[in-house]
Amino acid sequence: NAGVTQTPKFRVLKTGQSMTLLCAQDMNHEYMYWYRQDPGMGLRLIHYSVGEGTTAKGEVPDGYNVSRLKKQNFLLGLESAAPSQTSVYFCASSYSAGRFTGELFFGEGSRLTVL
Amino acid sequence: AQSVTQLGSHVSVSEGALVLLRCNYSSSVPPYLFWYVQYPNQGLQLLLKYTSAATLVKGINGFEAEFKKSETSFHLTKPSAHMSDAAEYFCAVLNAGNMLTFGGGTRLMVKP
């Protein structure tokens, strides 16, 4: 009963390095999201996808890229990491518009530190 | 876009005391509102939701929230706090495209 799985769970990067966070869901959800969580700021949407092969920008997309080549996977990439990207990243998934209930299913988070 | 504001980033109560976490929304149309809970080192999970049916909504673990249009509020309450309720709580509102916008969060601490 995996639900939403994020890898890696922890990562330390140096400024300028690149990395990819992987999110996998086994619930056949159409929608997938990447959020970042910072103290006092709640969760802010970075990018989202409404289906395989589609992506869209959220509230704070700068410095990030995403891809959804397979329905079950949603990748978040940092091409050149900056200290401002130190955060906890959450992936989530949900049903599509016709079946959407407002419930997002979250992974356990990936803690990224950029030195 | 609609937004929510959570008053108080930290709330501390004694075990057995009333829990009250505040959320106010800004919306020109009837909103869909949600409360999510995040336990330590975990992702968020849905606690309850308001979708314009009943104004008093009951959720999991004894929590409930009341939608008050006149006050633009959707406060979360629980009559008697338990140690296991210690967590961070997020209010959220549904925006266009089925996107949730979250408040800043309130960390609930429960003292023995």
Image: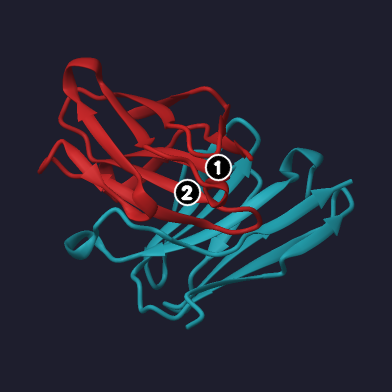
Chain colours: A cyan, B red
Q: Position of residue A50 (x, y in %)?
A: 35, 62
Report in which chain the residue with disc 1 lies.
B
Residue at left 47%, top 83%? A1
| Crowd around label 2: few <14 · some 14–19 · many ≥20 (10 Å) | many
Furthest-top residue in this view? B70
Q: Is residue B43 left or right of residue B34?
A: right
Choose between B56 and B18: the one closer to the eye: B18
Q: CA–CA distance between discs 1 and 2?
A: 6 Å
Q: Position of residue A72 (x, y in %)?
A: 45, 78
Residue at left 57%, top 46%? B87
Dividing the picture into quadrants, the one containing residue A41 is top right
Q: Is residue A51 left or right of residue A98?
A: right
Residue at left 41%, top 71%? A53
Q: Is residue B1 visible?
A: no
Dividing the picture into quadrants, the one containing residue B109 is top right
Q: Position of residue A105 (x, y in %)?
A: 43, 63
Choose between A11 and A101: the one closer to the eye: A101
- Tag 1: amino acid: Glu
Specify the label residue B37 is tagged with.
Answer: 2
Q: Position of residue B94 (x, y in %)?
A: 29, 42
Quarter of the rendering occupied by the C terminus of chain B: top right
Q: Is residue A22 above or below residue B7?
A: below
- Tag 2: amino acid: Val
Residue at left 29%, top 53%? A102
Label 2's element? strand
Q: Is residue A9 left or right of residue A41?
A: right
Residue identifier under label 1: B88
Label 1's element? strand
Q: Earlier in the sequence, mark 1 or mark 2?
A: 2
Q: Is residue A37 above or below residue B11?
A: below
